[in-house]
Each structure stands twice: as structure tokens, then as C-alpha cells.
Image (cartoon, rainbow, N blue to C red):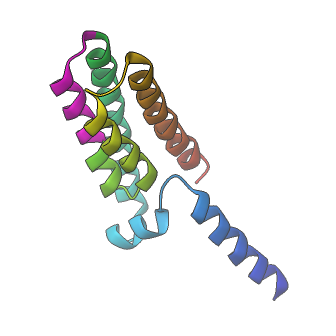
């Protein structure tokens, strides 16, 4: 019984610190492993594409391209229950035309870091 309580506590602690709320996502999509794999394949593919657009927008100082790409990732992240990534992207979307290039680069790095955290997390699931 004690091991079961510890396992539940560890799962709860893991879920609290996870970059994505898998339980909520699985509840939403019926806990279907094939569907889940397809969703993550699409999410990672579109996120990688949007990261390229963010990089280009930063380099070319293109506000609309930046906002569109950040908005796309933010929406996808919200749908995938990746709350932190959605919040980072929403803030980056709003703040692109404020601040210097260093801050913008930090925003891009934070987005990349969070996407990589999700990829790593999912690799071990």
C-alpha cells in the first residue's frame, strides 16, 4: 500500500512539473496512443516550422511574421495542454516591437527551450 501511495505522489509531482499536461490531453482525446502520436508528430512538425519563421522574423525585423509564428505556436501549445509554452509565446507575440534584439533573442530561446523540454519529456513517455 505504501508503494502505491508513493507512486501516486511521484506521478502527481511529475505531472505538476511536466511541460505538458498529458492527463488532460489524454482525457480530451480519449487516451488513444495512435491519436496521441499523430498529434505530437503534427505539433512538433509545425512547431519546428514556426521556429524557423521566428528566427527569420528576428533576423529580418519582421513584426507580422514574428507575431503570426508566435501565435501559431501559442495556439498549438494551448491545444496540446503545454501551458508554459503557450504563455511564453503569447508574451513574445505581444512584446516583439518592444525592447531590443537581446530581449527578442531571449524570447526565441525560451520558446526553443520549452519545445525541447516537451520533446524530451515525450521521448520518455
Q: Residue furthest right?
A: 2
Task: Identify the magenta region.
Answer: 60-73
Image side of residue 33 versus residue 64, left or right: right
The residue at the point 40 percent across, 43 percent down is 88
The residue at the point 31 percent across, 17 percent down is 58
In this rendering, the answer to whether 108 lies above or below 80 is: above
Residue 55 found in image quarter? top left
Quadrant that contains the N terminus: bottom right
66 and 79: which one is in front? 66
The residue at the point 47 percent across, 27 percent down is 106
In this rendering, the answer to whether 13 lies above or below 64 is: below
Q: Residue furthest front?
A: 99
Residue 36 horizontal/vertical position (percent)? 39, 57
The residue at the point 57 percent across, 41 percent down is 120
99 and 107: which one is in front? 99
Residue 16 horizontal/vertical position (percent)? 58, 64
Residue 30 horizontal/vertical position (percent)? 36, 72
Image side of residue 108 versus residue 114, left or right: left
Residue 57 found in image quarter? top left
101 and 109: which one is in front? 101
Overall secondary structure of the magenta stretch?
Answer: helix
Residue 61 among magenta residues: yes
Residue 14 among magenta residues: no
Residue 98 found in image quarter? top left
In this rendering, the answer to whether 59 lies above or below 32 is: above
Amino acid at each position: 500500500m505504501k508503494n502505491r501511495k508513493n507512486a501516486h505522489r511521484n506521478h502527481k509531482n511529475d505531472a505538476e512539473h511536466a511541460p505538458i499536461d498529458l492527463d488532460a490531453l489524454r482525457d480530451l482525446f480519449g487516451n488513444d496512443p495512435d491519436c496521441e502520436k499523430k498529434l505530437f508528430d503534427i505539433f512538433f512538425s509545425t512547431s519546428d516550422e514556426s521556429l524557423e519563421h521566428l528566427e527569420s522574423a528576428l533576423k529580418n525585423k519582421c513584426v507580422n511574421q514574428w507575431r503570426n509564428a508566435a501565435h501559431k505556436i501559442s495556439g498549438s501549445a494551448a491545444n496540446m495542454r503545454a501551458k508554459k509554452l503557450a504563455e511564453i509565446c503569447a508574451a513574445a507575440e505581444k512584446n516583439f516591437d518592444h525592447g531590443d534584439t537581446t530581449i527578442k533573442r531571449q524570447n526565441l530561446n525560451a520558446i526553443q527551450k520549452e519545445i525541447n523540454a516537451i520533446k524530451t519529456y515525450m521521448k520518455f513517455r
